[in-house]
Structures are given as C-alpha cells and as structure tokens.
Image (spheres, rainbow, N blue to C red):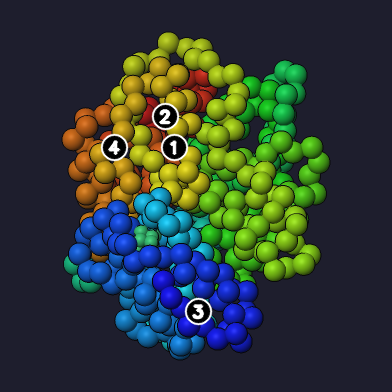
Amino acid sequence: MQTNFTLAQLADPDTAASEKILRACVHCGFCTATCPTYVLDGNELDSPRGRIYLIKDMLEHDRPATTDVVVHIDRCLSCLACMTTCPSGVHYMHLVDHARVHIENTYDRPPAERLLRALLAWLLPYPQRFRLALIAALPAKPLVPLFEAIGLKRLAAMLRLAPWRWPQRPLGPQTFPAVGARKGRVALLAGCVNDVMAPQINAATIAVLTRHGIEVVLAKGAGCCGSLVHHMGHDGEALAQARANIDAWTALEGLDAIVINTSGCGTTVKDYGFMLRTDPAYAAPAARIAGLAKDISEYLAALPLEPVQAMPRLTVAYHSACSLQHGQRVNRQPKELLGKLGFKVLDVPDGHLCCGSAGTYNILQPDFARRLRERKVGTIERLRPDVIAAGNIGCITQFAAGTKLPAVHTVELIDWATGGACPPALRAS
Ligand code: SF4
Ligand code: SF4
C-alpha cells in the first residue's frame, strides 16, 4: 500500500513502525473472511482491511480520531485472526495498538464512556481492588435481567461475568519449592483477574510444576502484564506496568522461564521487547524478559509428563484462545498434552473465530461479544463434549456465562491427570 507520510512524521518511531506495516498491506482482503466482526455484520469498515484504511487516513493526515473511526476500531477484538490469515505478514497488532493510543490522545469520549473506561483501568489490574468489586457484585447479580431490560447492558455484562462464589484473596509473593530434586526454576505471572476469579488455575499450575521438580516463584513487585490498559490505549500506564514486571523478574536469578497461564497476558509479555524498544534503560531487559516468556503449555511440553491415575476418558472440546493461536502461534502443545494424558480431544469448528471475550471487550462491546459467544457456544455444544478446555481465563469466563458445560483451563486437566485434584468445575457438574 502506498503511503504519504512526511519526513517529520516518520521521525516519530511509532509512526515509522506503522508506516512499515501499512506498506506491507496489498489490499488483497483475505483477512476479511476470518475477521469475527466482519463475519457478524459484513461491513467492510468492521474488517481488518477497512480498519487499516481508517488508521492510515487518520495517521497520515495527523488528524484527531473521528467518531466513525472510533466506532470501528473499538469494535475490533484484537483477536489477531487477521494476522494469521494475512499472506503479506501485516503486523496488525502493532498498528491497532498505535491507533488506540492516538484515539486516546485525540478523541473526547462521552462522559459515561470515559468513566467506565477509567473505572476498568483502575480496577482490573489490581487484584485487591478487583476482589472487593467482585464481593460488591454478588448481591447485584440477580438483577442482571432487570439491568438488561432497562438498557444498562454494560453493567449487566459486568455482573454476568462475576462469579457466584466469594472471591479468594490473591496469592502474594512467595516461592513454591520443587518436590524432590530441583530440575528447574520459573517465575509465574499470577495474573490479576486470573488470580482472583479462578484461583484453581494458578493452584493447578503450581501443583503440576512443583510435582515435576520445578520451583515456582511469584516475584515481589510483579503485577498486571499491562494488556488490560494497553488495549484501551493507555500507553503510559501499560509501559509502567511492563517496567515493574521487568524489574521484578530481572531481580530473580537462575530463571529458566517466565511461565504464563493467561494467554492474553502471554501475548503482551512476549511483546515487551517491541513495546519498550525506544527506552534506552529498558530495551535490552525487555527483550530478554520477552524471550523468557512461555505459555504454560509450551513449558509443560518439554517436561516428561505421564498420566498417574486412572482417568475417566473425557471428551474435551479444546477452544484455542485467540491470544494463544493467533497472538503466540501456540497450537499444537495443549492438544498434544491432553491427548498424551488420555483425554479425547476435539477441535472446535471455526476455531479461528473469537468467543467474544477479548479482555474488556465483553464489557465495552456487549452486543458483539454476546453474538460471538452464542455462535461459539452453539458450535461447541453440537460436539457434545464432557468439558471445554481453554488456555485463557477470559474465554473460560465467557463460556461460563453462556453454557452449562463445564469450562476449565487446560492446565487443570493436565494437573488432574498427573496426580493433582479434579478441577472444581468438573466436580460440580
Ligand atoms: S484483530 Fe480480529 S476483530 Fe480486529 S480486525 Fe483483526 S480479525 Fe478483525
Ligand atoms: S490479508 Fe493482509 S495484505 Fe491482504 S488486505 Fe488483509 S492485511 Fe492487507
């Protein structure tokens, strides 16, 4: 694609990076077929190619974001299916991230929208605050149908996602020693939402790793990966959270990996090198940390895992989270691990399409998110599985709000098969 940026514009490293991305696009439109929002409404402006044109026009003319641009960029899930499909290697993720920062800096959102976004940015990355919000949500959950009926869809969406149970306290910094001889040492990103909403995921991760001789450290000072605010265009906050994690993990010695069991976070940590490339103090440590980041399934695939207990031969519908399949290109390992441990694994048809979770998307875009969830849940239910497995808390929560099938993290099944406890969602079903 031809671009017309001035030399002065290209002196800005973010604009220079976006120009390179724009030039790689050849307008072929292959990406439209795999874009969930285009599949839903057939509008070119809700396709990757349409969004790329909108971003190009906005950045090239250095103009403030218009309402039309914001509507179509906000509807993008950042699922990155377009990146997997694109034959020209267009790095849509970096382009849309830049566009979101430009929107945040130049567009005046309506006050209610600004307030909601500020609330989410203040709440979600901080497990203690988030836990208190979940406690406050408990008595309001029965009011979801009422809120939906009177048009408070975003409030209804938030309450629908909150679990019915009392949220546990987040894990603090600590070390979980290896059982037996130590064969490795990793840092675990506990996650902010993950740790409070589904503590069984970290418990299973720690149990399976330590049982196989891996020491697990929750580093002092590590917190949210930054992706929640990064996807809202809050660049400064996202980079501050990334730097805090880099400092926390760099202070640990002898790490083999930084293990991440929330694939949305994994995609962001693996991108720290790019995010901090122009920061002289952090560029090198960020690249090093990004290189150490591994999804839990990638790390476990290199360990000698064996089933140690007689398992019911459960049929597992494996939902490949977008951030895992498109963001990190980790496709093989989760299914191979489950198959090796005795589960019957089914691929979900149209598996490239997002379930509609996408970080805060299911709160900020409740209609698109609901339609994507219904489509995905319908496809999965037709497979008649015993359980849904996914590698991301967002997808698991999204399913829990839309189907009676138990939905668990892949690592919960792996832990169970290798001697750990049965996942709570399966015990309850
Ligand atoms: S990231 Fe997903 S929703 Fe956004 S343009 Fe690409 S395919 Fe479409
Ligand atoms: S598939 Fe790639 S090159 Fe083709 S229109 Fe989409 S982003 Fe551009």
Can the viewer see residue 283? yes
> The residue under label 4 is which amino acid type?
Val
Left/right placement of residue 288 relative to residue 412 reads: right
Q: CA distance from mark 3 to mark 4?
A: 36 Å
Q: CA distance from mark 4 to mark 2?
A: 12 Å
Q: Quadrant of ligand 1?
A: bottom left
Identified by mark 1, the residue type is Asn
- Taking 425 as reference, is 4 left or right? right
Q: CA distance from mark 3 to mark 2?
A: 39 Å
User: Would you name the residue on which mark 3 appears?
Assistant: 102
Crowding at label 3, few (<14), some or many (≥20) Cα neighbours within 10 Å? many
Question: How far is the residue under mark 1 from the one under mark 2?
Answer: 8 Å
Query: In what element is the residue under mark 4?
Result: loop
- The Cα–Cα distance between marks 1 and 3, rounded to whole angstroms, is 33 Å
The secondary structure type at the circle numbered 3 is helix
Which residue is the site of mark 4?
A: 348
Q: Position of residue 195 (x, y in %)?
A: 54, 46
The alpha-carbon separation of the residues under discs 4 and 1 comes to 13 Å
- In the image, residue 102 lies at what x, y percent? 50, 79
Q: Earlier in the sequence, mark 3 or mark 2?
A: 3
Q: Earlier in the sequence, mark 1 or mark 3?
A: 3
In the picture of the structure, the residue carrying the numbered disc 2 is 335
Given the image, on which type of amino acid does mark 3 rest?
His
**The label number, if any, that marks residue 331 in the structure image:** 1
Q: Secondary structure at mark 1?
A: loop
The residue nearer to you, when weighing 116 against 31, is: 31
